[in-house]
Each structure stands twice: as C-alpha cells, then as structure tokens.
Image (cartoon, rainbow, N blue to C red):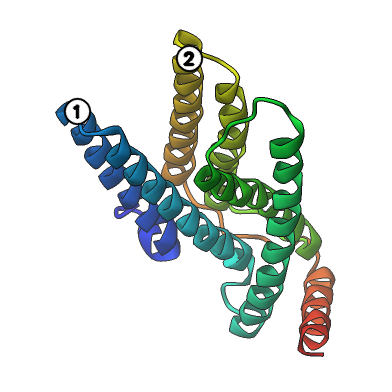
C-alpha cells in the first residue's frame, strides 16, 4: 500500500490493517503466556469492537470513493449513510433478538450480541456500496471491489460462526474456529490481490445518472433536515 500510495487513498483501511496486525501480536502473546480466561475475553471484546469501528469508517470511504472530487456530495451521502446505518442496526438487532429468544439453548454472551448486530448491519451496508456504484453508473475500482469483498467475508461469516459454535462441543467447536480463521485468511488474500493489481480509475457509465444522483442526494438531505 505504501509503494502504490494506497494508504493515502484508503487511510482508514490502512489503519485497520495495522490494527489487525497489532491485535494478532497481542493475542498470540497472551496465548503463549497462558493468561486468564477473563483477561482473554476482555481483550477479544476490545479487539472486535475496534475492528467493527474501523469497518464503519472503511464503509464510509467506500461510499465516497466514486465522489472523490465532490466534497458537497460526500457530506450529503455521509448524512444519508448515518441514517441508513441506524436503520440497519435496528433491523439487525430485531433479527438477532428473535433468534436469541426463540431458539432454545442459544447462549451467546450479551457483549457479543452487540458485536454481531453491527456485523449484520455492515453486511447490509456492503450491499448498498455495490448498489450505490450501480446507481451512479460508475464502474467500481478494483481496490474498492477487493476491500468490499473481503469485508463481506469477514463481517458475514462471524455471526454464522457464532451460531454454529453455540451448538457444538469439544473438537467440533475448534473446527468452527478454524473455519472462521479460514474465512479471514481468504479475505486477506483477496485484499492482497486487489491492492496489488494496477488501479483503474472509476469510469462513469452514464453522466446523466451521476447528475441524477446529485439531485437525489440533495433531495434526501432536505428531507433529513425537516
């Protein structure tokens, strides 16, 4: 990313990469030192919360990617994105809440419920990233596509893995951990590939659509102020 100056284009994603590297070093050291379960749990929750916070920042950058030269539209879409995020979090909370209270034997810790609600909401936002580019008629750059695809694997697999792990025991539980690790490693390989290939600038497919996008965003902004 430094060699291709991608850290300037996607600073939050670059910060996320550094955060994950430091997190791995800390968790691996704690495992080697055999620290207490309570400290392990607190560290894990802190690390997951930090990752999710950075994910939301990355998502905002992905939404702004096709609007790099329009700060006014970026501010407008940021407000709209905040509203969409709140709606998706509420819907995800309702969905996971129904699972938590209706399925017997579901024992996920309350702290992890909040984390998985955010993961499900982020999956919805990732879908909107693709629809946003489609609506503007702008081809998604290779780097944006790779980041979005990798994040989809990470955010989408975690809620499913937690559900599976809650109903298995012993070695089967470790297998679920290995599958989740495999998803994350697949995401890393996707990021390496798409960050490494030559960047193609976003190309407008329909300039009229982009103008309509601006008008649409301005309309939504006026509605938000009512």
Instruction: Please tell me in which quadrant of the rendered image residue 64 appears.
Output: bottom right
- Looking at the rendered image, the quarter that the C terminus falls into is bottom right
Label 2 sits on residue: 175
Please, is residue 225 above or below residue 211 in the view? Answer: below
For the point 50% across and 27% down, which residue is it?
A: 180
Residue 180 is tagged as none
For the point 56% across and 15% down, which residue is it?
A: 168
Residue 199 is situated, as x and y percent measured from the top left of the image, at 50, 52
Instruction: Please tell me in which quadrant of the rendered image residue 2 appears.
Output: bottom left
Secondary structure beneath label 2 = helix
Please, is residue 197 above or below residue 73 in the view? Answer: above
- Among numbered discs 2 and 1, the one appearing first in the sequence: 1
Secondary structure beneath label 1 = loop
Residue 213 is situated, as x and y percent measured from the top left of the image, at 79, 73
| Disc 1: CA contacts within 10 A as few (<14), some (14-19) or many (>=20) | few
Label 1 sits on residue: 34
> Could you tell me how far apart the alpha carbons at marks 2 and 1 are, in whole angstroms?
21 Å
């Amino acid at each position: 990313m430094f060699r291709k100056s991608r850290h300037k284009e996607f600073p939050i994603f670059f910060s996320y990469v550094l955060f994950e590297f430091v997190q791995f070093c800390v968790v691996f050291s704690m495992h080697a030192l055999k620290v207490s379960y309570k400290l392990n749990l607190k560290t894990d929750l802190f690390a997951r919360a930090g990752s999710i916070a950075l994910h939301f920042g990355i998502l905002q950058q992905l939404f702004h990617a096709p609007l790099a030269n329009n700060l006014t539209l970026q501010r407008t879409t940021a407000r709209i994105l905040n509203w969409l995020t709140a709606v998706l979090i509420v819907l995800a909370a309702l969905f996971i809440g129904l699972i938590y209270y209706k399925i017997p034997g579901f024992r996920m810790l309350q702290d992890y419920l909040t984390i998985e609600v955010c993961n499900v909401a982020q999956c919805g936002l990732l879908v909107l990233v693709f629809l946003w580019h489609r609506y503007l008629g702008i081809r998604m750059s290779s780097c944006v596509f790779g980041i979005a695809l990798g994040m989809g694997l990470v955010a989408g697999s975690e809620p499913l893995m937690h559900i599976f792990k809650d109903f298995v025991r012993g070695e089967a539980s470790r297998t679920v951990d290995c599958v989740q690790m495999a998803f994350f490693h697949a995401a890393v390989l996707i990021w390496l590939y798409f960050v490494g290939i030559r960047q193609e600038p976003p190309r407008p497919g329909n300039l009229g659509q982009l103008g309509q996008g601006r008008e649409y965003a301005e309309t939504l902004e006026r509605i938000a102020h009512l």
